[in-house]
Amino acid sequence: MLRVPGNLSIRQLIDTLEAGDFKGLLQAAADHEARGETRAAAATYRTALQAIPRFLSPSARPVLEHAKAVVDANDAALEAFLAERLAPVRARYPDQGLGRVDRSLDILLRKRRVYRPAPSFMYVPQLPAIEFYDRGDFPWLDALEAATADIRAELVQVLAGGPAALEPYVSVEGAPAPHWRELNNSRRWGVFYLWRAGEPVHENLARCPRTAAALADWPKCELKGTGPSAVFSILEAGTRIPPHVGVNNARLIVHLPLIVPAGCGFRVGAETRSWEPGRAFVFDDTIEHEAWNESDQPRAVLILDTWNPLLSAAEREMVTAMTAGVGDYYGELPQYAQGSA
């Protein structure tokens, strides 16, 4: 029987907890364990770990650690069991994409967390929670990628003007949210706007004519006060953008990497990717995401927004009208409706 400091058994520690459903689950799991019913114990401990009370005595920590160890060991055994069981099924579909059910398997085995859209402003129900979208839904990306060298060259010219060419991406008057305090009004995350809050920045576009030409066929997301938006985003060396979410899942965000030193990364939900210069990707920024640059050089990405391809034309027009209506009601869109990319 597992014992902890003070020579108390796990069962004795469970008995010291306050009565309730959580304690009852732990007791049931310990009973299964005592009878050698390892799999039943793990299943019950797993249920208990999903129902941890908000306030719990520090003495419960060894119990939680033991429960997690039992569940982890069982998950490893289950993974091996399922791999053998599923092998014949995989063999019958060698050319079929099974990525979706493979991610489901990872979630089942607690190897992958579930992240859901959590926009700060507008949520369109019944759109799937997709972290990174299939680029096949965005055929116009090919032409944008083909212009990468021209776009990068114009960015380099902009950066040659020094830090003053950029402005802080996070610029909140008064007290910003805690996770933005470090970057608020800082050029460590600096930007050069080409389109801003739905309006072209003509002076900046004139400085980048080849980039402007590359954006000519970009299907713009028309949202009063927020989109379309296109911006050169520069993340300085040793800088991290904290986990955050965007404003509206009717739009998606496109990244075209331009300058990417080693040590840079990007996470959306449970999936982490490295930027590859000249290779664009599209993601839902209303799913928690973060970025980091652990190199000693700046990282540069062209960021723009576009419509979620699963919306109909009528739905897009309604979303546009709803966004404009909120802005007209308040006089301007509230801060929570003006998002980051």
Image (tube, rainbow, N blue to C red):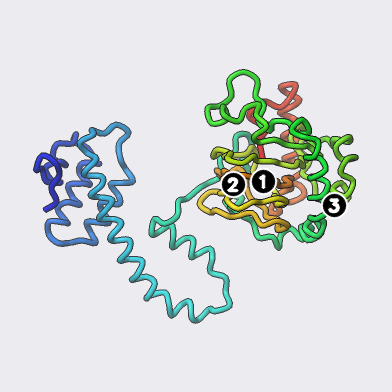
Amino acid type at image mark 3? Ala
Does residue 48 appear to the left or right of 87 in the view shown?
left
Tell me the tag on residue 214.
3
Check if mark 3's residue and mark 2's residue have beta carbons within 8 Å: no
Q: Secondary structure at mark 1?
A: strand
Q: Residue furthest left?
A: 7
The x, y position of residue 195, in whole percent, is 80, 38
Q: Secondary structure at mark 3?
A: helix
Q: Is residue 300 or residue 77 the one in the foreground?
A: 300
Q: Label 1: which residue?
A: 299
Amino acid type at image mark 1? Arg
Numbered disc in front, either 3 or 2: 2
The x, y position of residue 44, in whole percent, is 25, 53
Check if mark 1's residue and mark 2's residue have beta carbons within 8 Å: yes
Q: Label 2: which residue?
A: 295
Q: Quadrant of the C terminus?
A: top right
Amino acid type at image mark 2? Ser
Q: Residue at x 65, y 24 (%)?
A: 172
- In the depicted structure, whether residue 242 falls above or below residue 116: above
Mark closer to the chain start, 1 or 3: 3
Residue 304 sits in quarter:
top right
Does residue 78 appear to the left or right of 219 in the view shown?
left
